[in-house]
Amino acid sequence: MEHRITRWRTTLFSIALCSMLAGCGHEEGIQQPENTDTSAEQQQEININTQQEDRQQDPWQQDQPEGSPLNGGTAAGGTDSGDGRQIPDQTFELDLAPLGRVTFVSYGPDMDRDPQSDVVFQIQKDGRVTQTLEGMYGDNIRAEESFNRVEAVSFPDYNNDGYDDIITICSYTPASGAEMGTGYSEARIYSGNAQGSFTLQRGVTDAANSAVAEKTVRSILGFMGVGRGNAQTDAQPNAQADAQPDTQSDTRATSGWKQAYIDHLQQLDDNGWDGYSLIYIDDDTIPELVKVGCCEAMGCSIVSYGDDGINETSLNRLYFSYIERGGLLCNSEGNMDYYYDLVYRMEKGRLTQIASGYRGALDTPREFDANGNLVYVYEWEGVRMGEKEYEQALDQVYDGDKARRGYERDMLMTREEAIRSIETHAQ
């Protein structure tokens, strides 16, 4: 009997010991997911918003899409497919204007092709690739750094033209040298168009990467001026004016723009603005309201009025010119050897970008001539050209000889002065 008890106790002890060892082994084999997000804000940026109305109300909001990240492929690292390895948590099914329902696919580097290969982004529709987005380098090979991960993907209509755009942020690690083992982030800004294709805006991309230290979707949009009233807002008509009989539609329209501008100014946080001005970009009786920011990062905004109410366009930094009553505006700015000329046309109370050019040190690494001077590159509408050809292309769409400065700083009005000027405006 004693022998049986001893053997029974030994069996229980062995079972317990095996369970403990199995538990330890199981715990040791699980790799906890690495928490690379430094804030809740970064986590939100990986999610996207497919609702156009929400994007207009709050361009910072990044909601979870209806068709959340596609989890096809292996959990360990994606599925081999064409240009690289699919990254499941950065692959999305969503609606993109004007394409409709598409799949945005992120592929990791094709290491079999080259250890320094870069990430690849594709737009797919109905199972077919409609576009492979342009990379930062022509051969998609990075000579001096290695791809780390896709930090964020966002699909805002940042220029408010009705077509969705794409912003990606990726992190990289220097492949050699003293900085090996450190890392940095790089943004890419793609603009969408009516044909449903996306163009890498190298000038503004390079300018944003140069100017923004901590790169998030929020900070990149902030650099471009989005979020300071760039979305269209509907102006409420003047109830008293509507109630009164009026046989002149122009008088009714005038009353509408006055009340809309005054309401806009009264609801405005005045702290970030240095002053205000009224100008005439197009040839009608309604002026445009210029809001001048307190710093280059704040930039300027143009408030205009059309049939659909107030429209506001945020410009990059502080300088712009316009052809008075000619319907054209040019936002010519930049910093740190990255400059741009963005031409807008005013139609029916709305500014629309019609052409763009970038100049400066657009290539990486930068090139220098025999005298050690930085070599500038000129790019108009995505086409590389010489300086003279660039100036000719700009002159064809915007006659700088007819232009005038957007505002005179010493002539700017305070908010109260701007409201009084609008109230007493003759038109």
Image (spheres, grey):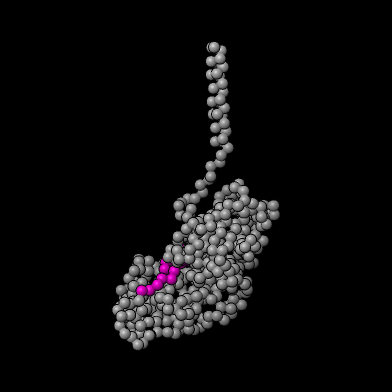
| Quadrant containing the N terminus in the rendered view | top right
What range of the chain is rendered magenta?
Answer: 222-236
Q: Is residue 13 above or below residue 85?
A: above
Residue shown at the point (40%, 75%) measured from the top left: 309
Q: Nearer the viewer, residue 73 or 106?
A: 73
Q: Residue furthest bottom?
A: 247
Q: Which quarter of the picture shows residue 296?
A: bottom left
- Residue 369 part of the magenta segment: no
2 or 394, which is in the foreground?
2
Question: Is residue 333 left or right of 238 when viewed as pictured?
Answer: right
Counting every numbered tag in the picture gives 0
Tell me the residue at 56%/17% (across/down).
7
Q: Position of residue 17 (x, y in %)?
A: 55, 25
Residue 321 pos. (x, y %): 47, 77
Which SS type dominates the magenta stretch?
loop
Q: Residue furthest front?
A: 1
Q: Quadrant of residue 262?
A: bottom left
Residue at image position (43%, 74%) is 311
Q: Is residue 78 above or below residue 357?
A: above
Camera-nearest residue between 397 and 239: 239
Foreground residue among 250 and 273: 250
Using the rendered image of the protein, determine whether residue 312 is visible from the camera's viewpoint: yes
The answer to whether any part of residue 152 appears in the image is no
At x 55%, y 75%, the residue is 355
Tell me if 135 is positioned left or right of 62 in this view. right
Q: Position of residue 125 (x, y in %)?
A: 61, 63
Residue 330, above or below 93: below
